[in-house]
Structures are given as C-alpha cells and as structure tokens.
Image (tube, grey):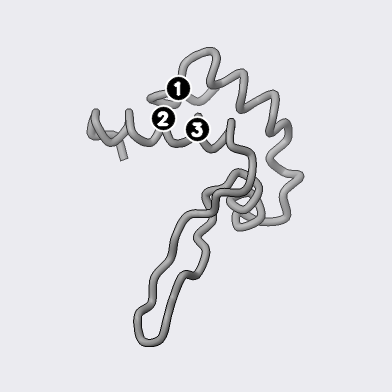
Amino acid sequence: MQHLNGIGPSGAARLLGDIGDVGRFASRDHFASWNGTALIDASSGDQHRHRLSRAGNRRINRVLHIMAIVQLRNGKR
C-alpha cells in the first residue's frame, strides 16, 4: 500500500468511492478533465493564458486540492 501525505481516511474513501478503477480513464488528460484540474485556454490576442475548469467532479477536485496544499506546506513534492 502506498502512503499519500495530506489525505486522511475520509478523503481516501472519497477518492476510492468516486474514482474506482483509475484504469477506466483513457489518459491522464481524461482523468484531469473528469476531476476538474484540466487547464482551459483563456488566451486573447498576443496574451497566452490558461485557467482552471470549474467543471468536473468537484468533490474529487477538493480532495486533490487539500492534499496538494498539505504537501506544499510540508515540503513534500
């Protein structure tokens, strides 16, 4: 079993329950689109920008966000 910093029992249960088998996603891009972490082009003219999607599974997005923040605060990258 692999240990993930920044995720507790309830977050892990949410990930396992909602995602199930991660192999069902054709690619990492498909998974990112499904959980709302895929970037969307927000460019205009000569300015090239991206923004995060507000679509996708918001519950999974929140668990991943909390996990990332905890890892950044504790120096785990």
- Quadrant in the picture for the N terminus: top right
Q: Position of residue 27 (x, y in %)?
A: 66, 56
- Which residue: 40% across, 86% down? 45
The reply to whether callout 1 and callout 2 are in contact (CB within 8 Å) is: yes
- Which residue: 60% across, 58% down? 29
Q: CA distance from mark 1 to mark 3?
A: 11 Å
**Residue 3 higher or lower than 37, as above or below:** above
Badge 2 density bin: few <14, some 14–19, many ≥20, Cα 10 Å: some
Judging from the image, what secondary structure is the residue with disc 3 in? helix
Q: Which mark is residue 66?
A: 2
The reply to whether callout 3 and callout 2 are in contact (CB within 8 Å) is: yes
Would you name the residue on which mark 1 appears? 7
As drawn, the residue found furthest toward the bottom would be 46
Amino acid type assigned to the residue bearing label 1 in the image: Ile
Would you name the residue on which mark 3 appears? 62
Q: Is residue 25 left or right of residue 74?
A: right
Amino acid type assigned to the residue bearing label 3 in the image: Arg
Amino acid type assigned to the residue bearing label 2 in the image: Ile
Badge 1 density bin: few <14, some 14–19, many ≥20, Cα 10 Å: some
Q: CA distance from mark 1 to mark 2?
A: 8 Å
Q: CA distance from mark 3 to mark 2?
A: 6 Å
- Which residue: 32% across, 28% down? 70
**In terms of sequence position, does the residue under pointer 1 or pointer 2 come before the other?**
1
Badge 3 density bin: few <14, some 14–19, many ≥20, Cα 10 Å: some
Label 1 or label 2, whichever lies nearer to me, is 2
Q: Position of residue 77 (x, y in %)?
A: 31, 40
As drawn, the residue found furthest toward the top would be 9
**In terms of sequence position, does the residue under pointer 1 or pointer 3 come before the other?**
1
Label 1 or label 3, whichever lies nearer to me, is 3
- Which residue: 24% across, 28% down? 74
Q: Is residue 55 left or right of residue 43?
A: right
